[in-house]
Amino acid sequence: MLRKRTILLVTVCMLLVSCSGEEQTAHNEAFAMDTFVTVTANGKNAGSAAELAIERIRELEGIWSVTDSGSDIYRINHEGSGEVHEETAELIDFSVGISAASQGAFDITLYPILREWGFTGEEYKIPDDRRISELLLNTGSEKISVQDMTVTVPENMQLDLGAVGKGAAGDIAAECLRNNGIDSALLNLGGSITAIGTKPGGESWKIGVRSPFGEENAAVITASDCSVVTSGAYERYFIGEDGKIYGHILDPETGRPAESDLASATVVGSSGRLCDALSTALFVMGSEKAEKFRQERDDFEMLLITNDGGIIITEELAAHTEIAEGFDENVRIIYPAQADAG
Ligand code: AMP
Ligand code: MG
């Protein structure tokens, strides 16, 4: 089988600081949470604030890692229960809520099935149907219990915060930057973006949404003080011996890679963890269910790219988005649900 994604086991930690008087621009890069992380911060003490933000991300990696034997998640996965850090309890509780709200499209209990497909390592394989059915018996976020700081899962259930951790870490690292006096910064955790304030001159940040079909941008979002997170199978996939593409986002109902009409789902909002969880959930749902889901709640904006290159975008986001040539021919705008005319 063809391995399409090479994980670069490189850790770069670089700090570039340019100063004018006391104002600084710091650009800090690291490899954390299995991805490249960059923090660009502007303001007084930007250099030390950016370093603290990266440190905070590393701490979160340490408690949410599935492979590090000292992590909260490892303990739950191997002992079935454990007292965890507040951040972990909160994130698991939040994830259980999103799982219910998305009618199971988002589910943090898929780790054993992801491992079976090889998505947790590099040895990809297509599991047989019987094995998937067996493993599906031990999934379902509604079976997770969070009581204060104690998390308990049924026997053979294992958790993975991969679909929500980067967004949540972005929120927490942004809070760390703000607490250190930074009101202009851009955090990028492997494509999960959190923008604090605006650029130093007051101009909004420009955030690219990558085309799922190539390296170019499909759209550019102009934004300040928000998170932008994209999910797509193109981020990690393999081509099976049958020639089919198998992506890393699973449909929790079937235990197989989600096959909706979407090539990517981008969510914009004020909470990074919500954007992260929902981008994964919408990708699984497909455009029809995603649109219905959006009509029921208005705490996020979305930009969906369909497999045939079409764009479906919420009205508010459309006003802040420039769609690239080639993607601008097939754009559909979603308007808020009309209140019933009495
Ligand atoms: P994201 O890139 O945020 O969409 O997260 C995808 C990652 O979350 C995958 O690599 C898996 O580790 C995990 N995952 C896959 N499918 C799901 C799902 N339906 N719900 C929650 N997590 C998932
Ligand atoms: Mg996600």
Image (spheres, grey):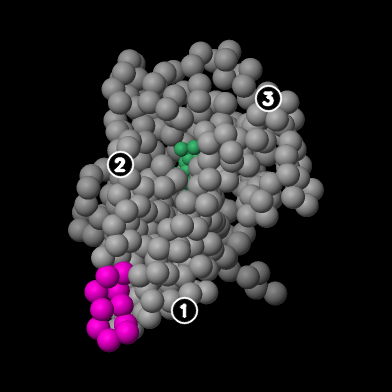
Is residue 164 shown above or below 19? above
Work out whether 238 lies above or below 58: above
Q: Position of residue 90 (x, y in %)?
A: 67, 54
Q: Name the one closer to the observer, 319 or 37.
A: 37
- Up/down of 46 relative to 138, above or below: below
SS category of the residue bearing label 2: loop
Q: In the rendered structure, which segment of residues is drawn in magenta?
A: 17-26
Q: CA distance from mark 1 to mark 3?
A: 45 Å
| Label 1 residue SS | loop
At a point 34% along the width and 16% down the height, the residue shown is 242
Tally the marks.
3
Q: Which structural element holds mark 3?
A: loop
Tell me where residue 252 appears, x and y as whole percent. Answer: 58, 33
**Residue at label 1?**
181
Say which of 204 and 73 sits in front: 73
**Farthest residue in the right direction?**
147
The residue that label 2 is drawn on is 10
Q: Residue at x 63, y 70 (%)?
A: 339
Asked whether the viewer can see residue 251, the reply is no
Q: What label does residue 156 carry, if any?
A: 3
Work out how far the residue at label 3 is from the one at label 2, CA to CA, in angstroms.
Answer: 33 Å
Q: Is residue 135 visible?
A: yes
Compare residues 319 and 31 and report the one nearer the observer.
31
The answer to whether residue 36 is magenta is: no
